[in-house]
Image: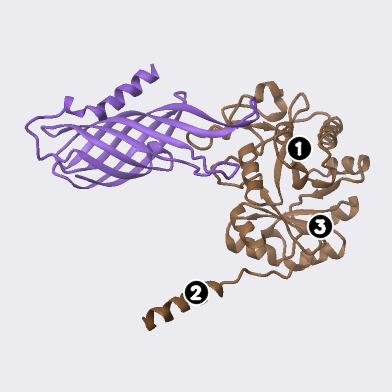
Chain colours: A brown, B purple
Amino acid sequence: MKRILIIVCLVFLSITSCKKEVFDIENLNGNRITALGHAGMGVGNTYPMDSYESIVKCLNLGMDGSEFDVQMTKDSVLVLFHDMNFSERTNLKGTVNSLNWNEIKNAHYSQTLYLDYSIISMEQLFSNVENLQKYKFTFDCKMDADITDANRFYESFINAIVKIVQKYKIENNIYIEAQDVGFLTRFKNKYTDYKLFIYPSSFESGLNTALSLNLSGITISTRDITKEQIKIAHDNNLWVAIWNTHTNEDNMDAINKNPDFIQTDNVRNLVSLLK
Amino acid sequence: MKCIYLVFILSIFIDSNAFAQKDSLEISRNLIYVEVGGAGGYGSVNYERVLLDQNKFMFTARLGLSSYHIKDFRNDFNPDILIPLALSGSYGENHKLELGIGQTVANIVHFDFTENKPARKTNFHTFLTLGYRYQKSTGGIFFRFAYHQIFELNEYLNHWAGVSFGYSL
């Protein structure tokens, strides 16, 4: 009996001594990290990236919000879609920019056997998220379109974003990121209050671009940035969003670098670490 | 047509004596197994009934159950339901070559943008199976690996594979 009691006590002690990891975070975001899903539940999930189900699942698991990929159709509708071409992961062919929304709205993802979730517009997402104001969203604006008049395309894209953001009154909840410097320049010149992030190939080029365009920050893979570089960005008053975290180790490593945002592919794990 | 097909498949399980051999009392007719991959998607649990076992020919009917998500995107208990149904014929003593045909009934939870609420959608997906199975007529360990051609929504061809482990009794 005594032995059993000792074993029970030891088990109890071992369970209670498993404390939640405490992170000493220093950043520009009030010393807390905004936890975002990477296109919802992330790469490799059974919910396709950028689908309604993926994004809403991520929000319902306790994340602060989600990043998602944004492209524009021929008739200027903003669509959530990652790839350059539909053919790889959907039942459609062509690019977002080569089709009208009417040609896309009945299409579905075909990447996972038996699961045929819809391709959605940004309007469909925002009109169907409960407590929308509560969440943060990062728009990864894809300029992959085959465009002849870039300035005109940028202008339409920016107008479409601003229109929907104003409609849902989420100006303070959204962040715009893009690789295209021309797009960011035009956006910054037109709307100074929007928080714009450059998505560079290296930290150095991102830092230079962000400083020269007076952007809000840098979005970069966790593999391409160190804790020291994030400190440099913060010293220059630039926020840092990092992505490409798939495992517990990736998330822990990312947190310890003190970024302002993490866009993770391992949503459940990041929730367990930060919430 | 699909309903008639389903009723036919189910009736096989309910009244399998219609195919049974009266003089084969020692044959293990019930098989329970787990399939990784295969017609259930990422995996399924299955019951198979031996309808005929004679002269190295075995004829079976399968009923499986699988899911992708137990909780839906709202995080509520609301599982996707996948039911692989199949008829298979195999030839061999214990080591058998198998050919099969079936349908997976997929009842998936998604967001319905017309109704603006979560809904269930049922689709039928035909599959063909070519595989190797190890199964003794008298029962015991069962093993199979199979190549599946799955016609998703009866329209798009997917090449798929499955490995099964189980026990017949």
Q: Position of residue A238 (x, y in %)?
A: 84, 58
Of callouts 3 and 2, the N-terminal one: 2
Up the image or down, A250 lies above or below A81; here it is: below
- In-front residue for pair B24/A218: B24
- The residue carrying mark 3 is A239
Q: Secondary structure at mark 3?
A: strand
Q: Residue at x 17, y 45 (%)?
A: B139
Using the image, tell me which numbered label, if any, was put on residue A12.
2
Of callouts 2 and 1, the N-terminal one: 2
Up the image or down, A102 lies above or below A2; here it is: above
Q: Does label 1 lie on the same chain as label 2? A: yes
Query: Splitting the image into 4 quarters, where does residue B24 fall?
Result: top left
Chain bearing mark 3? A
Chain bearing mark 1? A
Q: Secondary structure at mark 2?
A: helix
Residue lying furthest bottom: A2
| Residue kind at label 1, given as amino acid type | Met
Q: Position of residue B29 (x, y in %)?
A: 18, 38
Residue lying furthest top: B1
- The residue carrying mark 1 is A143
Alpha-carbon span between mark 2 and mark 1? 55 Å
Q: Position of residue A249 (x, y in %)?
A: 59, 64
Residue density around tag 1, few if under 14, some if 14–19, many if 20 or more, within 10 Å: many
Q: Position of residue A145 (x, y in %)?
A: 74, 33
Q: Residue at x 73, y 67 (%)?
A: A227
